[in-house]
Image (cartoon, rainbow, N blue to C red):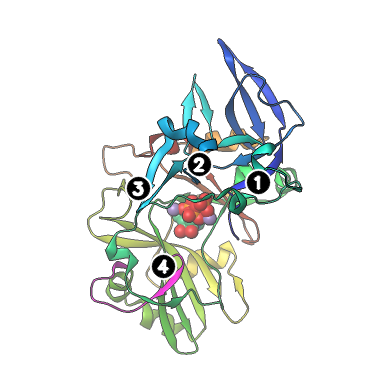
């Protein structure tokens, strides 16, 4: 699923901000952002650019230079991230539809490419990137989670389900698979060659993951988050690196194991799951309340510290519904 970084939306709400005369708070789906007063009205169509958008250097985006200019490798652009203005969280950017020029858009349409908007990706350390063996195999899915702010249409229906909650760890995705006798190691988007130095392969060797998967006699993939030294900010203060798993995928059935099978399975391999915080959770009344619950200390905080966790991943017990609630406190601290 490609993220729709810029899409055509309807403005759902516009509210005043106490004590601020020149700005207002707009809501779009489950997102809120600060706009100039009277820039948009409820019901207007607009282009909404999500956080992590990297906008090209063009005249019409120059107003972003002061706040958002950034380089991504050699490329210059404007990066949208979570900010706080007058005490209000503001995420993303609304542009008038006229930035599309003379173009017949449809509601919900992804217009990122038309506007030259790509995703801002922080640099990946060499020890994680590794050497590429090939594309991510098509007999399984890449790891990914939708943001709850984009699920406002589904949220009411989701309230009927029971969920389990895991802590979302801020590391790097890893997939280990055994398929028809072949063992493989993948990062987020690619399959990696075995090398001495690659962290994902090192952790596989240390934990004997290949043999453990062989011993099951099944075609399976296990997917998790690699955390530790040299990965993101290592807020967990770990020495070395370790993988914490959140998926077991049955390649032959082409489906994930439900919660009640996934946890014991990972434990039976002598591996660890991501921290399970709750296993009989029902959704609060609003997306905003869920986002507030996402703030909190990581259960993996180093002793005596309260590391701000990245957020929560919320899944129905059968694993068919899955999405993330990223902590806004975490996002506001992000460099
Ligand atoms: P985005 O799509 O929002 O741009 P992203 O897909 O690059 O972001 P994340 O925001 O990190 O990445 O969200 C999805 C990732 O979260 C998964 O690919 C997985 O690696 C990671 N993750 C960390 N902890 C968990 C967890 N507890 N459950 C599921 N996934 C997790
Ligand atoms: Mn994603
Ligand atoms: Mn991540």
Mark closer to the chain start, 2 or 3? 2
Say which of marks 1 and 4 sits in front. 1
Mark closer to the chain start, 2 or 1? 1
Secondary structure of the residue carrying tag 4 is: loop
Camera sees residue 257: yes
The structure residue drawn at horizontal position 55% and vertical position 68%, both measured from the top left corner, is 261
Q: Residue 312 in the image: x percent, y percent? A: 51, 46
Per the image, the residue denoted by label 4 is 187
Pointer 1 and pointer 3: residues touching (CB < 8 Å)?
no
The structure residue drawn at horizontal position 51% and vertical position 84%, both measured from the top left corner, is 218
Q: Residues within 10 Å of mark 3 (few under 14, many from 20)?
A: some
**Looking at the rendered structure, which numbered label has been put on residue 192?**
none
Q: Residues under labels 2 and 4: Cα distance? A: 33 Å
**Looking at the rendered structure, which numbered label has been put on residue 300?**
3
The structure residue drawn at horizontal position 27% and vertical position 65%, both measured from the top left corner, is 127
Which one is nearer the viewer's eye here, 86 or 164?
Answer: 86
- Start and end of the magenta stretch? 187-199
Magenta span: helix, strand or loop, mainly?
A: loop
Secondary structure of the residue carrying tag 1 is: strand
Q: Residues under labels 2 and 3: Cα distance? A: 43 Å
Pointer 2 and pointer 4: residues touching (CB < 8 Å)?
no
Say which of marks 2 and 3 sits in front. 2
Per the image, the residue denoted by label 1 is 7
Magenta stretch: residue 139 in it? no
Pointer 2 and pointer 3: residues touching (CB < 8 Å)?
no
Q: Residues under labels 3 and 4: Cα distance? A: 23 Å
Q: Residues under labels 2 and 1: Cα distance? A: 19 Å
Q: Residues under labels 1 and 3: Cα distance? A: 36 Å
């Amino acid at each position: 699923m490609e993220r729709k970084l810029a899409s055509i939306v309807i403005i759902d709400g516009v509210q005043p901000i106490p004590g601020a005369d020149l700005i207002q708070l707009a809501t779009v789906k489950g997102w809120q952002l600060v706009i100039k007063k009277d820039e948009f009205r409820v019901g207007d169509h607009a282009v909404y650019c999500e956080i992590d958008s990297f906008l090209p250097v063009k005249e019409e985006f120059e107003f972003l230079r002061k706040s958002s200019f950034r380089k991504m490798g050699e490329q210059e652009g404007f990066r949208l991230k979570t900010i706080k203005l007058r005490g209000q969280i503001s995420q993303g950017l609304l542009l008038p539809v006229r930035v599309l020029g003379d173009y017949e858009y449809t509601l919900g349409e992804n217009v990122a490419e038309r506007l030259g908007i790509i995703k801002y990706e922080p640099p990946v350390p060499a020890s994680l990137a590794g050497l590429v063996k090939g594309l991510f195999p098509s007999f399984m899915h890449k790891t990914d989670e939708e943001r709850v702010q984009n699920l406002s249409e589904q949220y009411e229906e989701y309230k009927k389900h029971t969920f389990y909650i895991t802590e979302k760890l801020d590391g790097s995705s890893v997939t280990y698979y055994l398929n028809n006798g072949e063992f493989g190691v993948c990062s987020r988007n690619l399959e990696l060659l075995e090398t001495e130095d690659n962290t994902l392969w090192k952790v596989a060797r240390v934990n004997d993951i290949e043999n453990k998967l062989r011993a099951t006699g099944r075609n399976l993939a296990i997917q998790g988050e690699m955390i530790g030294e040299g990965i993101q900010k290592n807020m967990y203060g770990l020495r070395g690196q370790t993988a914490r798993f959140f998926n077991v995928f049955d390649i032959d059935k082409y489906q994930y194991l439900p919660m009640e099978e996934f946890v014991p399975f990972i434990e039976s391999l002598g591996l660890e799951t991501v921290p399970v915080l709750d296993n009989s959770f029902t959704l609060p009344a609003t997306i905003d309340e869920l986002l507030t619950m996402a703030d909190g200390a990581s259960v993996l905080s180093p002793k005596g510290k309260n590391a701000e966790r990245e957020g929560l991943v919320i899944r129905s017990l059968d694993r068919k519904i899955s999405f993330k609630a990223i902590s806004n406190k975490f996002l506001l601290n992000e460099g």
